[in-house]
Image (tube, grey):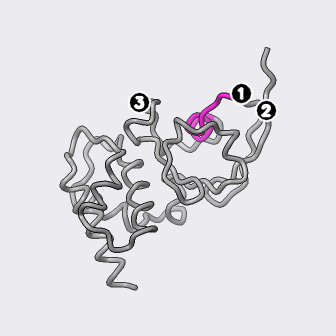
Amino acid sequence: MSESLAYQLHVNGEARDVADAWVGESLLYVLRERLGLMGSKGACEQGECGSCSVLVDGSLVCSCLVLAASATGEAIVTIEGVAPPGAPSDVQPAFVDAGAVQCGFCTPGLIMAAHALLDQSPDPSEYEIREALSGNVCRCTGYGRIIDAVQRVAVGRRGTA
């Protein structure tokens, strides 16, 4: 019988306790099943689709590939934490306005990828946008409108800087 773990994660600016956890639980599992943060999606469970993308210390990661217990002491940001509660981030309405969403399953991961890119490169080229989104799979929209949405946000941020 394996021992259970108890640890604390720093998620969306809050310390969150995780109790009675198995050492092999992924960050995705803990976020969804233990902490009730349902925004990150479990699709491939192999790090191929990007639907589970979150920021860990500012870096975009597939949360299905990260052992949750290894993320203690790191700042984790999920789709629920990219903006103040009840308000969208600037990326979220840009996706809607550009028609970059359909079924929505991949959308949280794509929005997290867009945030990661724009936080590191406020004026990305189309190539940089494509590269930043390359770890995310969308089967509904294609990528043209998603790229347009990210470009709109970059332009909007430059206009307010």
The residue to which callout 2 is attached is: 5
The residue to which callout 1 is attached is: 22
Instruction: Of the two numbered discs 2 and 3 on the same chain, state the one appearing first in sequence.
Output: 2
Name the residue: 25% across, 55% down. 146
Percent coordinates x, y for residue 161 in the rendering:
40, 85
Q: Is residue 144 left or right of residue 151?
A: left
Percent coordinates x, y for residue 19 in the rendering:
77, 36
Confirm or deny contact between disc 2 and disc 1 (CB under 8 A): yes
The residue to which callout 3 is attached is: 44
The amino acid pointed to by label 1 is Trp
**Alpha carbon distance from label 3 to label 1:** 21 Å
The amino acid pointed to by label 2 is Leu
| Residue 153 vertical placement versus 57 (above, below) | below
Majority SS type along the magenta span: helix
Percent coordinates x, y for residue 79 in the rendering:
48, 53
**Alpha carbon distance from label 2 to label 3:** 26 Å
